[in-house]
Image (cartoon, helix red, strand yellow):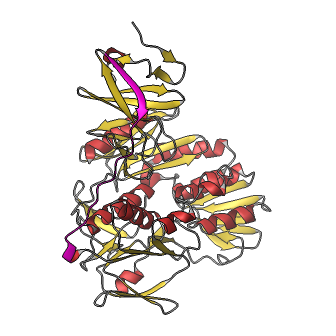
Amino acid sequence: MSSDTTENTGFDLTKGITLADFGDQQLLRGQVGDEPIVLVRTGNEIMAIGAHCTHYGGPLEEGLVVGETIRCPWHHACFSLRSGEALGAPAFDPLLCWKVERDGERVFVHNRISPAAQPELLIAVTDRPKNIVIVGGGAAGFACAEMLRRRGYQGHLTMLSEDTDAPCDRPNLSKDYLAGTAPEKWMPLRPDDFYKDNHIDLQLGTVVQHIDTANHRITTKDDRSILFDRLVLATGAEPVRLPIPGQDSAHVFTLRSFSDSRRIIEHAKNARTAVVLGSGFIGLEVAAALHTRGLAVHVVSLDQSPLQNVLGSKLGNFIRSLHEAHGVTFHMETSLTNIESESVTLSNGDKLTADLVILGVGVRPRTALAESAGLNVNKGILVDEYLQTSVPGIYAAGDVARWRDEASRQALRIEHWVVAERQGQVVAENLLGANKKFQDVPFFWSVHYDLTINYAGHAQSWDTIEIDGDIAARDCLVRYQRNGVTTAVAGIGRDKQILEFAAASA
Protein backbone atom coordinates (compact mmCIF):
# COMPACT_ATOMS: atom_id res chain seq x y z
CA MET A 1 0.00 0.00 0.00
CA SER A 2 1.41 3.40 -1.01
CA SER A 3 2.40 5.89 1.70
CA ASP A 4 0.61 9.22 2.01
CA THR A 5 1.93 11.94 -0.29
CA THR A 6 1.46 15.65 -0.64
CA GLU A 7 1.34 17.17 -4.12
CA ASN A 8 4.65 18.76 -5.27
CA THR A 9 6.38 18.16 -1.94
CA GLY A 10 6.59 14.37 -1.80
CA PHE A 11 5.85 12.04 1.09
CA ASP A 12 4.59 13.21 4.48
CA LEU A 13 7.46 11.75 6.48
CA THR A 14 5.71 12.17 9.82
CA LYS A 15 3.32 9.42 8.65
CA GLY A 16 6.19 7.24 7.54
CA ILE A 17 7.29 5.44 4.39
CA THR A 18 8.57 1.98 3.60
CA LEU A 19 11.77 1.05 1.82
CA ALA A 20 9.61 -0.02 -1.11
CA ASP A 21 8.69 3.63 -1.61
CA PHE A 22 12.26 4.28 -2.74
CA GLY A 23 11.83 1.87 -5.64
CA ASP A 24 15.18 1.79 -7.41
CA GLN A 25 15.97 5.40 -6.40
CA GLN A 26 18.54 6.47 -3.85
CA LEU A 27 16.91 9.85 -3.15
CA LEU A 28 13.33 10.48 -2.10
CA ARG A 29 11.59 13.85 -1.66
CA GLY A 30 9.36 14.39 1.36
CA GLN A 31 8.35 16.90 4.00
CA VAL A 32 7.88 17.40 7.71
CA GLY A 33 5.22 20.06 8.17
CA ASP A 34 6.28 22.85 5.83
CA GLU A 35 9.92 21.73 5.72
CA PRO A 36 11.04 20.07 2.46
CA ILE A 37 13.34 17.11 3.05
CA VAL A 38 15.32 14.61 1.00
CA LEU A 39 15.77 11.09 2.29
CA VAL A 40 19.02 9.44 1.21
CA ARG A 41 19.38 5.67 1.17
CA THR A 42 22.94 4.40 1.44
CA GLY A 43 23.07 0.65 1.95
CA ASN A 44 20.85 -0.18 4.92
CA GLU A 45 21.05 3.34 6.31
CA ILE A 46 18.68 6.23 5.63
CA MET A 47 19.60 9.86 6.32
CA ALA A 48 17.45 12.98 6.07
CA ILE A 49 18.63 16.43 4.94
CA GLY A 50 17.16 19.74 3.78
CA ALA A 51 15.87 19.50 0.22
CA HIS A 52 17.50 22.63 -1.19
CA CYS A 53 21.14 23.57 -1.71
CA THR A 54 22.10 26.52 0.49
CA HIS A 55 23.83 28.25 -2.43
CA TYR A 56 21.05 29.02 -4.94
CA GLY A 57 18.41 26.56 -3.75
CA GLY A 58 19.13 23.74 -6.21
CA PRO A 59 16.92 20.62 -5.82
CA LEU A 60 19.02 18.04 -4.03
CA GLU A 61 16.67 15.19 -4.92
CA GLU A 62 18.14 15.60 -8.43
CA GLY A 63 21.69 15.56 -7.10
CA LEU A 64 24.31 12.84 -6.79
CA VAL A 65 25.34 10.84 -3.72
CA VAL A 66 29.07 10.10 -3.52
CA GLY A 67 30.07 8.15 -0.44
CA GLU A 68 28.65 10.04 2.52
CA THR A 69 28.20 13.27 0.59
CA ILE A 70 25.56 14.74 -1.71
CA ARG A 71 26.29 17.12 -4.58
CA CYS A 72 23.97 19.79 -5.94
CA PRO A 73 23.02 19.41 -9.63
CA TRP A 74 23.13 23.14 -10.33
CA HIS A 75 26.57 24.29 -9.20
CA HIS A 76 28.12 21.16 -7.64
CA ALA A 77 28.18 22.28 -4.00
CA CYS A 78 29.05 19.30 -1.80
CA PHE A 79 27.50 18.52 1.60
CA SER A 80 28.09 15.95 4.32
CA LEU A 81 25.08 13.67 4.72
CA ARG A 82 25.83 13.14 8.41
CA SER A 83 26.48 16.69 9.59
CA GLY A 84 25.05 18.78 6.75
CA GLU A 85 28.33 20.71 6.54
CA ALA A 86 29.03 22.44 3.23
CA LEU A 87 32.24 20.59 2.43
CA GLY A 88 32.75 22.09 -1.01
CA ALA A 89 31.93 25.54 -2.41
CA PRO A 90 30.04 27.37 -3.79
CA ALA A 91 27.81 26.69 -0.77
CA PHE A 92 29.09 27.77 2.64
CA ASP A 93 26.00 27.36 4.82
CA PRO A 94 25.19 23.84 6.09
CA LEU A 95 22.08 21.84 5.35
CA LEU A 96 19.58 21.03 8.07
CA CYS A 97 19.72 17.39 9.17
CA TRP A 98 16.83 15.37 10.58
CA LYS A 99 16.53 12.35 12.84
CA VAL A 100 15.37 9.19 11.07
CA GLU A 101 13.43 6.65 13.18
CA ARG A 102 12.42 3.12 12.24
CA ASP A 103 9.43 1.16 13.45
CA GLY A 104 9.38 -2.25 11.84
CA GLU A 105 9.14 -1.75 8.09
CA ARG A 106 8.30 1.94 8.31
CA VAL A 107 10.62 4.94 8.42
CA PHE A 108 9.61 8.22 10.09
CA VAL A 109 11.11 11.70 10.34
CA HIS A 110 9.93 14.12 13.03
CA ASN A 111 12.74 16.21 14.52
CA ARG A 112 15.83 18.12 13.47
CA ILE A 113 19.27 17.11 14.64
CA SER A 114 21.32 19.77 16.40
CA PRO A 115 24.21 20.94 14.18
CA ALA A 116 27.37 19.00 14.89
CA ALA A 117 30.52 20.86 15.85
CA GLN A 118 32.85 21.03 12.86
CA PRO A 119 36.17 19.20 13.19
CA GLU A 120 39.18 21.30 14.08
CA LEU A 121 42.42 20.99 12.17
CA LEU A 122 45.36 22.30 14.11
CA ILE A 123 49.00 21.53 13.40
CA ALA A 124 51.60 20.90 16.09
CA VAL A 125 51.80 23.65 18.69
CA THR A 126 55.42 24.41 17.80
CA ASP A 127 54.45 25.20 14.20
CA ARG A 128 51.02 26.71 14.67
CA PRO A 129 50.74 30.00 12.73
CA LYS A 130 49.81 32.94 14.92
CA ASN A 131 49.33 35.36 12.07
CA ILE A 132 47.87 34.47 8.66
CA VAL A 133 47.54 37.12 5.97
CA ILE A 134 45.45 36.71 2.82
CA VAL A 135 46.13 39.10 -0.06
CA GLY A 136 42.96 39.31 -2.13
CA GLY A 137 39.26 39.75 -1.42
CA GLY A 138 37.73 37.55 -4.10
CA ALA A 139 36.43 33.99 -4.14
CA ALA A 140 39.63 32.24 -3.08
CA GLY A 141 40.50 34.72 -0.35
CA PHE A 142 37.04 34.65 1.20
CA ALA A 143 36.76 30.85 1.05
CA CYS A 144 40.16 30.51 2.72
CA ALA A 145 39.29 32.88 5.58
CA GLU A 146 35.87 31.32 6.13
CA MET A 147 37.29 27.78 6.27
CA LEU A 148 40.12 28.79 8.60
CA ARG A 149 37.62 30.00 11.18
CA ARG A 150 35.28 27.07 10.55
CA ARG A 151 38.15 24.66 11.23
CA GLY A 152 38.97 26.30 14.54
CA TYR A 153 41.87 28.61 13.71
CA GLN A 154 42.03 31.24 16.46
CA GLY A 155 45.10 33.21 15.46
CA HIS A 156 45.14 36.65 13.88
CA LEU A 157 43.60 36.58 10.41
CA THR A 158 43.95 39.52 8.01
CA MET A 159 42.48 39.99 4.53
CA LEU A 160 43.96 42.74 2.36
CA SER A 161 41.77 43.64 -0.59
CA GLU A 162 42.17 46.35 -3.23
CA ASP A 163 38.40 46.29 -3.76
CA THR A 164 36.23 48.86 -2.05
CA ASP A 165 33.51 46.22 -1.47
CA ALA A 166 33.59 43.15 0.72
CA PRO A 167 33.78 39.77 -1.09
CA CYS A 168 30.74 39.43 -3.34
CA ASP A 169 29.00 36.95 -5.63
CA ARG A 170 31.14 37.77 -8.67
CA PRO A 171 29.38 35.44 -11.18
CA ASN A 172 26.25 37.52 -10.71
CA LEU A 173 28.03 40.71 -11.76
CA SER A 174 27.58 39.74 -15.41
CA LYS A 175 24.32 37.86 -14.93
CA ASP A 176 21.24 38.74 -12.84
CA TYR A 177 22.68 41.74 -11.03
CA LEU A 178 23.78 43.43 -14.25
CA ALA A 179 20.45 42.54 -15.85
CA GLY A 180 18.60 44.18 -12.96
CA THR A 181 16.88 41.00 -11.77
CA ALA A 182 18.97 40.52 -8.60
CA PRO A 183 18.97 43.21 -5.89
CA GLU A 184 22.22 44.53 -4.45
CA LYS A 185 21.50 43.01 -1.05
CA TRP A 186 21.95 39.53 -2.57
CA MET A 187 25.50 40.23 -3.68
CA PRO A 188 27.77 40.11 -0.58
CA LEU A 189 28.96 36.60 0.24
CA ARG A 190 28.50 37.49 3.90
CA PRO A 191 27.09 40.55 5.70
CA ASP A 192 29.55 43.06 7.14
CA ASP A 193 29.16 41.79 10.69
CA PHE A 194 30.41 38.33 9.63
CA TYR A 195 33.98 39.64 9.51
CA LYS A 196 33.70 41.35 12.88
CA ASP A 197 32.00 38.38 14.54
CA ASN A 198 34.66 35.99 13.21
CA HIS A 199 37.57 38.32 14.00
CA ILE A 200 38.61 38.63 10.37
CA ASP A 201 40.48 41.90 9.85
CA LEU A 202 39.15 42.79 6.40
CA GLN A 203 41.02 45.83 5.08
CA LEU A 204 39.37 47.17 1.93
CA GLY A 205 41.00 49.57 -0.51
CA THR A 206 44.42 48.25 0.52
CA VAL A 207 47.19 47.88 -2.05
CA VAL A 208 50.13 45.60 -1.19
CA GLN A 209 53.35 47.09 -2.51
CA HIS A 210 55.98 44.52 -1.51
CA ILE A 211 56.44 41.12 0.15
CA ASP A 212 59.62 40.49 2.14
CA THR A 213 59.70 36.69 2.24
CA ALA A 214 62.83 36.50 4.42
CA ASN A 215 61.37 38.64 7.21
CA HIS A 216 57.73 37.63 6.68
CA ARG A 217 56.67 41.22 6.18
CA ILE A 218 54.22 42.94 3.85
CA THR A 219 54.45 46.61 2.95
CA THR A 220 51.33 48.40 1.77
CA LYS A 221 51.16 51.33 -0.61
CA ASP A 222 50.45 53.64 2.33
CA ASP A 223 53.72 52.49 3.98
CA ARG A 224 52.25 50.21 6.63
CA SER A 225 54.07 47.01 7.61
CA ILE A 226 52.13 43.82 8.31
CA LEU A 227 53.84 40.69 9.64
CA PHE A 228 52.79 37.15 8.76
CA ASP A 229 53.64 33.58 9.71
CA ARG A 230 51.79 32.20 6.70
CA LEU A 231 50.73 34.05 3.57
CA VAL A 232 48.05 33.33 0.97
CA LEU A 233 48.19 35.07 -2.40
CA ALA A 234 44.73 35.27 -3.93
CA THR A 235 45.38 38.30 -6.12
CA GLY A 236 43.20 37.01 -8.96
CA ALA A 237 43.30 38.40 -12.47
CA GLU A 238 42.70 41.74 -14.18
CA PRO A 239 40.92 42.54 -17.45
CA VAL A 240 43.00 42.79 -20.59
CA ARG A 241 42.91 46.17 -22.31
CA LEU A 242 43.88 46.26 -25.97
CA PRO A 243 45.68 49.31 -27.44
CA ILE A 244 42.54 50.79 -28.99
CA PRO A 245 42.34 54.58 -29.36
CA GLY A 246 39.53 55.90 -27.18
CA GLN A 247 39.49 53.00 -24.70
CA ASP A 248 39.98 55.40 -21.79
CA SER A 249 36.75 57.28 -22.57
CA ALA A 250 34.10 57.62 -19.86
CA HIS A 251 31.64 55.33 -21.67
CA VAL A 252 34.12 52.43 -22.01
CA PHE A 253 34.21 49.79 -19.27
CA THR A 254 35.67 46.46 -18.25
CA LEU A 255 33.83 44.20 -15.79
CA ARG A 256 35.62 42.61 -12.88
CA SER A 257 34.48 44.17 -9.61
CA PHE A 258 31.21 45.06 -7.92
CA SER A 259 31.96 48.72 -8.52
CA ASP A 260 32.56 48.00 -12.24
CA SER A 261 29.10 46.48 -12.51
CA ARG A 262 27.52 49.41 -10.66
CA ARG A 263 29.17 51.90 -13.02
CA ILE A 264 27.99 50.00 -16.08
CA ILE A 265 24.43 49.91 -14.71
CA GLU A 266 24.48 53.64 -14.01
CA HIS A 267 25.75 54.45 -17.50
CA ALA A 268 23.28 52.05 -19.13
CA LYS A 269 20.36 54.04 -17.70
CA ASN A 270 20.94 56.76 -20.30
CA ALA A 271 22.28 54.56 -23.12
CA ARG A 272 20.43 53.13 -26.08
CA THR A 273 23.15 51.13 -27.85
CA ALA A 274 26.00 49.03 -26.52
CA VAL A 275 28.98 47.37 -28.19
CA VAL A 276 30.60 44.41 -26.44
CA LEU A 277 34.09 43.45 -27.61
CA GLY A 278 34.59 39.73 -27.06
CA SER A 279 32.39 36.65 -27.50
CA GLY A 280 33.50 34.64 -24.48
CA PHE A 281 31.30 33.83 -21.53
CA ILE A 282 31.59 37.23 -19.84
CA GLY A 283 31.03 39.11 -23.10
CA LEU A 284 27.93 37.13 -23.97
CA GLU A 285 26.50 37.27 -20.45
CA VAL A 286 26.99 41.04 -20.48
CA ALA A 287 25.28 41.21 -23.89
CA ALA A 288 22.28 39.28 -22.53
CA ALA A 289 22.11 41.45 -19.39
CA LEU A 290 22.26 44.73 -21.33
CA HIS A 291 19.64 43.48 -23.77
CA THR A 292 17.41 42.68 -20.78
CA ARG A 293 17.84 46.32 -19.75
CA GLY A 294 16.47 47.38 -23.13
CA LEU A 295 19.66 48.33 -24.97
CA ALA A 296 20.39 47.47 -28.59
CA VAL A 297 23.50 45.28 -28.32
CA HIS A 298 26.27 44.48 -30.81
CA VAL A 299 28.93 41.81 -30.14
CA VAL A 300 32.27 42.22 -31.94
CA SER A 301 34.77 39.34 -32.00
CA LEU A 302 37.78 38.07 -33.93
CA ASP A 303 36.49 34.50 -33.59
CA GLN A 304 34.50 32.70 -36.27
CA SER A 305 31.87 31.65 -33.75
CA PRO A 306 31.24 32.57 -30.10
CA LEU A 307 32.97 30.40 -27.50
CA GLN A 308 34.53 28.26 -30.23
CA ASN A 309 37.75 27.65 -28.28
CA VAL A 310 35.86 26.41 -25.22
CA LEU A 311 32.68 24.76 -26.50
CA GLY A 312 33.31 24.17 -30.21
CA SER A 313 31.49 25.70 -33.15
CA LYS A 314 28.20 23.74 -32.97
CA LEU A 315 27.36 24.64 -29.39
CA GLY A 316 28.88 28.10 -29.85
CA ASN A 317 26.74 28.83 -32.90
CA PHE A 318 23.64 27.62 -31.06
CA ILE A 319 24.34 30.16 -28.31
CA ARG A 320 24.83 32.78 -31.02
CA SER A 321 21.45 31.93 -32.51
CA LEU A 322 19.86 32.26 -29.08
CA HIS A 323 21.28 35.76 -28.68
CA GLU A 324 20.27 36.71 -32.21
CA ALA A 325 16.72 35.55 -31.50
CA HIS A 326 16.71 38.10 -28.67
CA GLY A 327 17.93 40.85 -30.99
CA VAL A 328 21.70 40.86 -30.39
CA THR A 329 23.75 41.55 -33.54
CA PHE A 330 27.09 39.78 -34.10
CA HIS A 331 30.10 41.06 -36.04
CA MET A 332 32.49 38.11 -36.19
CA GLU A 333 36.07 37.94 -37.48
CA THR A 334 36.58 41.63 -36.86
CA SER A 335 37.66 43.93 -34.03
CA LEU A 336 37.66 47.57 -32.96
CA THR A 337 40.16 50.01 -34.41
CA ASN A 338 38.82 53.16 -32.79
CA ILE A 339 36.33 54.21 -30.09
CA GLU A 340 34.66 57.59 -30.48
CA SER A 341 32.28 59.40 -28.15
CA GLU A 342 29.13 57.95 -29.75
CA SER A 343 30.42 55.24 -32.10
CA VAL A 344 33.07 52.63 -32.77
CA THR A 345 34.93 51.75 -35.95
CA LEU A 346 35.50 48.08 -36.80
CA SER A 347 38.59 46.69 -38.50
CA ASN A 348 36.44 45.81 -41.54
CA GLY A 349 35.56 49.50 -41.92
CA ASP A 350 32.03 49.36 -40.53
CA LYS A 351 30.91 51.96 -38.01
CA LEU A 352 28.49 51.24 -35.16
CA THR A 353 26.62 53.61 -32.89
CA ALA A 354 27.75 53.05 -29.30
CA ASP A 355 26.64 54.91 -26.18
CA LEU A 356 28.27 52.20 -24.07
CA VAL A 357 31.30 49.99 -24.81
CA ILE A 358 32.33 46.91 -22.82
CA LEU A 359 35.78 45.39 -23.33
CA GLY A 360 35.50 41.68 -22.59
CA VAL A 361 38.54 40.12 -24.22
CA GLY A 362 39.79 38.12 -21.24
CA VAL A 363 41.92 38.58 -18.15
CA ARG A 364 45.55 38.08 -17.17
CA PRO A 365 46.79 36.78 -13.79
CA ARG A 366 48.08 39.38 -11.37
CA THR A 367 51.55 37.97 -10.74
CA ALA A 368 53.70 41.11 -10.40
CA LEU A 369 53.65 41.06 -6.59
CA ALA A 370 54.69 37.40 -6.45
CA GLU A 371 57.36 37.85 -9.11
CA SER A 372 58.95 40.81 -7.33
CA ALA A 373 59.01 38.72 -4.13
CA GLY A 374 61.04 36.01 -5.88
CA LEU A 375 58.32 33.36 -6.20
CA ASN A 376 58.37 31.11 -9.25
CA VAL A 377 56.02 32.56 -11.87
CA ASN A 378 55.12 31.28 -15.33
CA LYS A 379 51.72 32.28 -16.72
CA GLY A 380 50.57 32.34 -13.11
CA ILE A 381 52.06 31.71 -9.68
CA LEU A 382 53.43 28.17 -9.77
CA VAL A 383 52.21 25.96 -6.93
CA ASP A 384 52.55 22.29 -6.01
CA GLU A 385 49.72 19.84 -5.52
CA TYR A 386 49.11 21.32 -2.06
CA LEU A 387 48.90 24.83 -3.59
CA GLN A 388 52.14 25.93 -1.90
CA THR A 389 54.41 28.23 -3.88
CA SER A 390 58.16 27.90 -4.33
CA VAL A 391 58.59 29.67 -0.97
CA PRO A 392 57.54 27.46 1.99
CA GLY A 393 54.68 28.91 4.01
CA ILE A 394 53.35 30.98 1.10
CA TYR A 395 50.36 29.61 -0.82
CA ALA A 396 48.45 30.78 -3.87
CA ALA A 397 44.84 30.10 -4.86
CA GLY A 398 42.29 31.17 -7.44
CA ASP A 399 42.75 32.75 -10.86
CA VAL A 400 46.40 33.54 -10.18
CA ALA A 401 47.49 30.00 -9.25
CA ARG A 402 48.95 27.55 -11.79
CA TRP A 403 49.19 23.96 -10.65
CA ARG A 404 49.96 20.59 -12.21
CA ASP A 405 46.79 18.56 -12.58
CA GLU A 406 47.48 14.90 -11.89
CA ALA A 407 44.56 13.62 -13.98
CA SER A 408 45.48 15.46 -17.18
CA ARG A 409 49.20 15.79 -16.42
CA GLN A 410 48.95 19.41 -17.54
CA ALA A 411 49.85 22.68 -15.87
CA LEU A 412 46.53 24.43 -15.37
CA ARG A 413 45.39 27.90 -14.44
CA ILE A 414 41.60 27.95 -14.36
CA GLU A 415 39.50 31.12 -14.18
CA HIS A 416 36.40 29.52 -12.64
CA TRP A 417 34.57 30.75 -9.55
CA VAL A 418 34.07 27.31 -7.99
CA VAL A 419 37.70 26.33 -8.62
CA ALA A 420 38.89 29.49 -6.84
CA GLU A 421 36.67 28.85 -3.82
CA ARG A 422 37.65 25.19 -3.59
CA GLN A 423 41.33 26.10 -3.79
CA GLY A 424 40.88 28.64 -1.02
CA GLN A 425 39.31 25.93 1.14
CA VAL A 426 42.13 23.47 0.46
CA VAL A 427 44.74 26.11 1.31
CA ALA A 428 42.95 26.84 4.61
CA GLU A 429 43.07 23.20 5.64
CA ASN A 430 46.70 22.87 4.58
CA LEU A 431 47.61 25.91 6.65
CA LEU A 432 46.25 23.93 9.59
CA GLY A 433 48.20 20.78 8.80
CA ALA A 434 45.84 18.75 6.61
CA ASN A 435 48.44 18.06 3.89
CA LYS A 436 45.60 17.85 1.38
CA LYS A 437 46.10 17.76 -2.38
CA PHE A 438 43.91 19.86 -4.65
CA GLN A 439 42.18 17.33 -6.89
CA ASP A 440 38.82 18.89 -7.69
CA VAL A 441 37.52 18.64 -11.24
CA PRO A 442 37.07 22.14 -12.71
CA PHE A 443 33.44 23.21 -13.05
CA PHE A 444 31.60 26.33 -14.19
CA TRP A 445 28.18 27.42 -15.36
CA SER A 446 27.04 30.13 -17.73
CA VAL A 447 23.59 31.70 -18.13
CA HIS A 448 22.19 33.20 -21.34
CA TYR A 449 18.60 34.44 -20.91
CA ASP A 450 16.71 31.28 -19.86
CA LEU A 451 19.49 28.89 -20.89
CA THR A 452 22.08 27.46 -18.49
CA ILE A 453 25.17 25.57 -19.63
CA ASN A 454 27.14 23.46 -17.16
CA TYR A 455 30.72 22.41 -17.90
CA ALA A 456 33.01 20.02 -16.03
CA GLY A 457 36.60 19.06 -16.72
CA HIS A 458 39.07 20.99 -18.82
CA ALA A 459 39.73 20.58 -22.54
CA GLN A 460 42.55 22.80 -23.74
CA SER A 461 42.13 21.13 -27.13
CA TRP A 462 40.33 18.14 -28.62
CA ASP A 463 40.36 15.96 -31.69
CA THR A 464 36.76 14.77 -31.40
CA ILE A 465 33.50 16.23 -30.14
CA GLU A 466 30.64 13.80 -29.46
CA ILE A 467 27.12 15.14 -29.04
CA ASP A 468 24.56 13.03 -27.20
CA GLY A 469 21.06 14.45 -27.64
CA ASP A 470 19.83 17.52 -29.48
CA ILE A 471 21.42 20.95 -28.96
CA ALA A 472 18.51 22.78 -30.58
CA ALA A 473 16.08 21.00 -28.25
CA ARG A 474 18.18 22.14 -25.26
CA ASP A 475 18.81 18.56 -24.24
CA CYS A 476 22.39 17.53 -24.88
CA LEU A 477 25.66 16.32 -23.43
CA VAL A 478 28.74 17.36 -25.38
CA ARG A 479 31.91 15.32 -24.82
CA TYR A 480 35.32 16.77 -25.65
CA GLN A 481 37.78 13.97 -26.40
CA ARG A 482 41.48 13.70 -27.06
CA ASN A 483 43.08 10.39 -28.05
CA GLY A 484 39.84 8.63 -27.21
CA VAL A 485 39.65 10.06 -23.67
CA THR A 486 36.87 12.44 -22.60
CA THR A 487 38.57 15.36 -20.87
CA ALA A 488 35.53 17.61 -20.43
CA VAL A 489 31.77 17.68 -20.88
CA ALA A 490 29.27 20.47 -21.41
CA GLY A 491 25.56 20.02 -21.01
CA ILE A 492 22.15 21.60 -21.37
CA GLY A 493 19.48 19.83 -19.32
CA ARG A 494 21.95 17.08 -18.34
CA ASP A 495 22.89 18.17 -14.82
CA LYS A 496 23.07 14.65 -13.38
CA GLN A 497 25.42 13.44 -16.12
CA ILE A 498 27.70 16.42 -15.58
CA LEU A 499 27.81 15.54 -11.87
CA GLU A 500 28.57 11.92 -12.65
CA PHE A 501 31.43 12.88 -14.97
CA ALA A 502 32.96 15.18 -12.35
CA ALA A 503 32.69 12.51 -9.65
CA ALA A 504 34.19 9.82 -11.86
CA SER A 505 37.07 12.09 -12.93
CA ALA A 506 38.10 13.15 -9.44
The residue that appears at 50% across and 89% down in the rendered structure is: 221
Quick one: which residue is furthest to the top in this view?
Answer: 1
Q: Is residue 154 left or right of residue 162?
A: left
Q: Is residue 311 left or right of residue 503?
A: right
Q: Quadrant of the N terminus?
A: top left
Residue 110 forms part of the magenta stretch: yes
Residue 19 forms part of the magenta stretch: no
The residue that appears at 66% across and 41% down in the rendered structure is: 325
Quick one: which residue is furthest to the right in this view?
Answer: 270
Residue 352 shows in the view: no
The residue that appears at 41% across and 66% down in the rendered structure is: 145
Q: Position of residue 60 (x, y in %)?
A: 43, 35
Q: Is residue 5 left or right of residue 113?
A: right
Q: Nearer the viewer, residue 478 or 442?
A: 442
Image-quadrant location for residue 353: bottom right
The residue that appears at 58% across and 62% down in the rendered structure is: 334
Q: Nearer the viewer, residue 452 or 1?
A: 1
Q: Position of residue 338 (x, y in %)?
A: 66, 73
Residue 351 shows in the view: yes
Q: Position of residue 207 (x, y in %)?
A: 50, 83
Query: Which residues fall within the magenta stretch?
Result: 106-126
Image-quadrant location for residue 279: bottom right
Q: Nearer the viewer, residue 215 or 262?
A: 215
Q: Position of residue 415 (x, y in %)?
A: 42, 61
